[in-house]
Amino acid sequence: MKLYIGFDDTDNAEATIGTGKLARHFEDLLPGGCRLWGVVRQQLLVDPGIPYTSHNSSACVVIEMSDVSVNEAILKRAVEHIERESLPGSDPGLCVALEGHPVLSALIAFGKRCTEKIVTQQEALEAARGVHLSGHGGTNGGIIGAAAAVGLSAWGWSGRFIEFRDLRAHPEVVSVSRLTECGITVVSLDRDAVIPHPEDMVFTKGWLRPRHWGHSAVLPVIQTGKGQWESLGGKRKKQ
């Protein structure tokens, strides 16, 4: 069983630890019987009418657990974590929803709306009715991104992984077979759809961030030579 935990707007312009890193650090607080499946960054609408720190993204921690009775303990720790780690001037929001909950369909629709139009806190509260959604400071505006992060991650076709198993332990050039062993599917975007073979090598530019496609970690690549591939995207500076 998966549990989705959305975090948003926990930092400020001077922060060294953004919302994504705060979400990643939550792994250290998981109770026994739970494990981190991944942390997914979700990109929301960038618009002058929306206050955000750098890129208007939120993060969803996805946990696998065998016993739903630990749900309350996780929620308590998530609240304590966001209240302890959020910085002055931020508007933190937290959303927690269990896989299969009936309200996820409304959260998915809400998350999609957040990628194309300006929405309100009231809309977020209505979409999340029946699951946990709370603000923890400032204007509480982060409830919008937190709810969207849960909805889009539950949808399974949006975002990129900022944590997934040993994501940061791989070298700059890594074999397709090694990525496959770690649960990352390498998919060619070459015009001829050439299939990457296990012995082929992928240049990640030192920034391995699979997409969240089909509820899986998928790395889109383009061919740069025989048996050689390069992953799409790259690290950008904070605005």
Image (cartoon, rainbow, N blue to C red):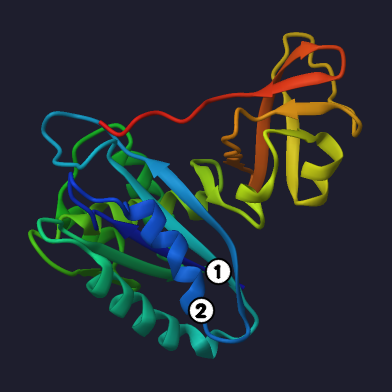
Q: Residue at x 44, y 69 (%)?
A: 26
Quadrant (top left, top right, bottom left, bottom right) of the C terminus? top left
Say whether residue 101 is visible: no
Say which element carries label 1: strand
Q: In the figure, 239 relative to 66: above or below?
A: above
Q: Residue at x 53, y 67 (%)?
A: 99
Q: Residue at x 55, y 69 (%)?
A: 63
Which sits in the foreground, 198 or 1? 198
Say which element carries label 2: loop
- Report x, y in % for residue 29: 46, 78
Any mark on residue 121, and which?
none
* Residue at image mark 1: 63
Quadrant in the picture for residue 54: top left
Measured in 3D between alpha carbons, the distance from the residue under mark 2 to the one under mark 1, in whole angstroms, is: 9 Å
Name the kind of residue labelled 2 in the image: Leu
Name the kind of residue labelled 1 in the image: Ile
Q: In the figure, 124 relative to 214: above or below?
A: below
- Report x, y in % for residue 78: 36, 75
In front of the other: label 2 or label 1?
2
Q: In the figure, 70 relative to 127: above or below?
A: below
Q: In the figure, 147 relative to 233: above or below?
A: below
Mark 2 or mark 1, earlier in chain: 2
The answer to whether the residues at label 2 and label 1 have Cβ atoms under 8 Å apart is yes
- Report x, y in % for residue 91: 15, 58
Q: Residue at x 8, y 59 (%)?
A: 139
Any mark on residue 30, and which?
2
**Could you classify mark 2 by the number of other residues whose Cα lies within 10 Å: few (under 14), some (14-19), or many (20 or more)?**
some
**Could you classify mark 1 by the number of other residues whose Cα lies within 10 Å: few (under 14), some (14-19), or many (20 or more)?**
many
Say whether residue 96 is visible: yes
Quadrant (top left, top right, bottom left, bottom right) of the N terminus? bottom right
- Report x, y in % for residue 103: 40, 64
